[in-house]
Amino acid sequence: MAKKLDKVDVVTVGVGWMGGIVAAELTKAGYKVVGLDKGKEKDIKDYLHTHDEVRYPVRGEGYEKLTNETYTVRNTLEEDARPIRDKSTAVIGEGIGGGGSHWGAQTHRYYPYDFEIRSKTIEKYGEEKIPKNMTLQDWGITYDELEPYYDKFEKMAGISGEPDPNYPERSDDYPTPPLKKNRQMLLFEEAVKKMGYNPFVIPSGTLSEQYTNPDGETLNACQYCGFCGSNYCEYGAKADPVMTVIPTAKKTGNFELRTHARVIRILHENGKAVGVLYEDTRTGQEFEQPADLVVLTSYVFNNVRLLLLSEIGKPYNPENGTGVIGKNFTDHHGVTSSHGLFDNEKFNNYVSTGAYGMAITDYTGDLVDHHDLDFLHGGQIEARITGNAPVANNIVPEGTPQWGKEFKEKSLFYANRFLMIFSQKATLPYQEYYLDLDPTYTDANGDPLIRITWDYSDNDKAIHEFIQEKHVEILEEMGATHILAYPMPEHFSGGLAFQHNGGGVIMGKDPETSAVNSYLQMWDMDNLFVCGASAFPHFSCTNPTTTAAALTYRAAEGMMEFLKNGGQLVEAKSQKRLV
Amino acid sequence: MTENKDANQKNVSDNQEEVDLSKRQFIKTAGMTTGGIVGGILLGSFISKPFKTEKYEPASEDSHHHGSGGHNTFTEAMQFFTRIEDLLTLSAAAEIIFPEDENGPGAIALGAPYYIDKQLASPWGKNIDDYRKRPFLEGESPLNRGDTMLTGLRKLNEVSQSKYNDIFNNLEEDAQIEILKGFEAGEIEMNLVSSAGFFALLRQLTLEGCYADPLYGGNKDMEGWRMKEFPGAYMSYTDVVEVEEFVKKEPMSLSNHM
């Protein structure tokens, strides 16, 4: 029998970036917030000795153990899904801070085109440009409406960067200057400028200088130590919920953080959430936590899974495209990457941070005319210096074996003679790709796991072909002796590599086609908000945290408005599409 | 600091002949005779020396001040393996994957076999943090990593026996390479796991054993890092970030942070 606890104003399910932002904003405003996280407590004392390739990136010290639960994957509606079993291939953040403790901290904003992608595409190219099974939707919000919240996130996190010359002027500069340019970045910059592109230093949550944010939290200057993207920052130089929003919430005295607290169900009566049921993962004891407002802040998978398990919202049906929970799932791990090897250059590749490099956005959104292109949207092109961790980095010229004498010799020779060109591509949604509950595999309690049905689309493959040609041109211009242009895998394997998934509880203007409004408030349940990349109707080119966090800052204002006055914050608009 | 490869190079080549001899000799003579193993006591006396990795002097005298230093080999014994011939097969295969050459030591001298033994004995080797619920579908292996390794190593010897009438360790290098290529390509029929899956684990663990922080028992004296000019666990590179030419640093291990 679950033990019933005293009611609070707000309960969040997960205490990473989204849960931390909600906790900070609402506790500062005087609301009592309980944060539940199924993982462990963490603080910077746990971050020492993270300069360890095997323990962190290879084995995944910072990733959630899959002993009790995982997710399953299939490529088509006809297949049986199989569980992802190996912890190190499912890069799900563990403990408070979640993925925000071990992220690479690349913090681009999304583009104005993204938020109105359907309307703008039809306006310019006509509806026939959108493939029939591509469920492209507007987000129900514009870039201009979201801009102040991007700014708010960047100031909280101390983001280092410089403006992207291709996109609208920002309301304010990045709070800290860009990271220093190294030799590889200068080479890239020179080459792409010559080719007519507009390079800029990648904005990053690894800070170029010490910075105190508006909440009074201080982050330190990045040391370029090279143990970043899968590691905790030993220096406190990486924006991390554990270093920022969580202590901000704690300082108010209004925040109670409970770890080892795994939420099993959202409790609801008569269309209203009344709280959550959770278990202490150490004892198995169940608790009922009543709250006026329930906020799901578990990124994507667990947001969707809890709604489905709790029977809230209409589950999505991929056969006819009706329903919303699980809809427009996108996986964003199908990156395009190419290596250039330089026989006569030697770089300090061991010097790096999580999102270190320069980028161009000239092929993103709708900046180039798509009339004669067989895809929509596009991809960024980045020169990325990701460190030179020696187990993972063994780059050899094409045709070299992957082990043995020649491998050893070449991998040693090229250890500091390569650089990488990297593209994350926009991933657009399709009717047959979605999330639901797995019919076979369960967690340790017997509840079904979340199931992914997803594969690479023609759009992904076409962007890959297009953008990789540009990689090769750039590497040639930079003077590479050998160019390795890696093909895309034929099918999505289910491994995550980083934590880029989106959709499943998408935002929009119409309750028929979206699950939450532009404040991330459920259309079907006024006192339930769902924050995370689960709200993305499609995945743009770059990393999700910045946009998910900006949406969550805006949602936090909506939550306060709701706690004062109640009701739906946005008037629903039917956007019935002509078929 | 600029590159000073010559000094390292010399040091490595001075050692090379000695190590080469001991390793090869050992693998050829000490292991097993066709169809059976030699007696335990005899075997023990053969094993002790060539298997200890103390023969490699650090390339730079400085390393004593930075890293694991010292030469004790108390941690070089078996935690996971129970049969010595499994460790011998593993060592021979790992050495083929990452051989000793003019650049420096190979997998054996770097301690990779002991690293692998320790990893397989760890919770990771038993897949403790992984999702293990049945059913295992076609293409999935129900074996944990330790069992995958044992199954694969024994299959290596089986294939060697049937093709060349001798165990893997005793074969000429070319034959060993040929057999491993067959495993890598998934051409060898195995029970419950694919030969490609076994080979991928073997290769991954071998590279880890050569390049992991020495705290795990491989990358002896940081020689793997030194060869690769990877500095290891430095706290800061603010001094290097804007330097145009390559900056070679003497490696540092996590033990230096204690």
Image: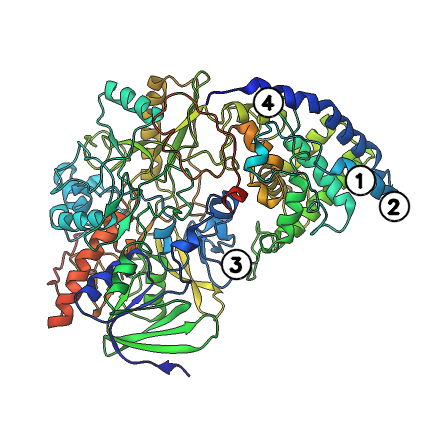
Q: Is residue A360 left or right of residue B87?
A: left
Determine which residue is flagged by label 2.
B41
Comes first in the chain, label 1 or label 4 = 4
Q: Amino acid at mark 4?
A: Asn
Which chain does the residue under circle 3 lie in?
B
Determine which residue is flagged by label 3.
B131
Residue A339 in view in this figure? yes
Disc 2 versus disc 4: distance between alpha carbons? 38 Å
Q: Amino acid at mark 1?
A: Ile
Image-quadrant location for residue A222: top left
Q: Nearer the viewer, mark 3 or mark 4?
A: 4
Tell me if mark 4 has few (under 14), some (14-19) or many (20+) residues whose alpha carbon lies within 10 angstroms of its own: some
Comes first in the chain, label 3 or label 4 = 4
Q: Nearer the viewer, mark 3 or mark 1?
A: 1
Q: Nearer the viewer, mark 1 or mark 4?
A: 4
Q: How is the image coloured?
A: rainbow
Determine which residue is flagged by label 1.
B47
Comes first in the chain, label 2 or label 4 = 4
Tell me if mark 3 has few (under 14), some (14-19) or many (20+) residues whose alpha carbon lies within 10 angstroms of its own: many
Contact? badges 1 and 4 (CB < 8 Å): no
Q: Is residue B16 left or right of residue A373?
A: right
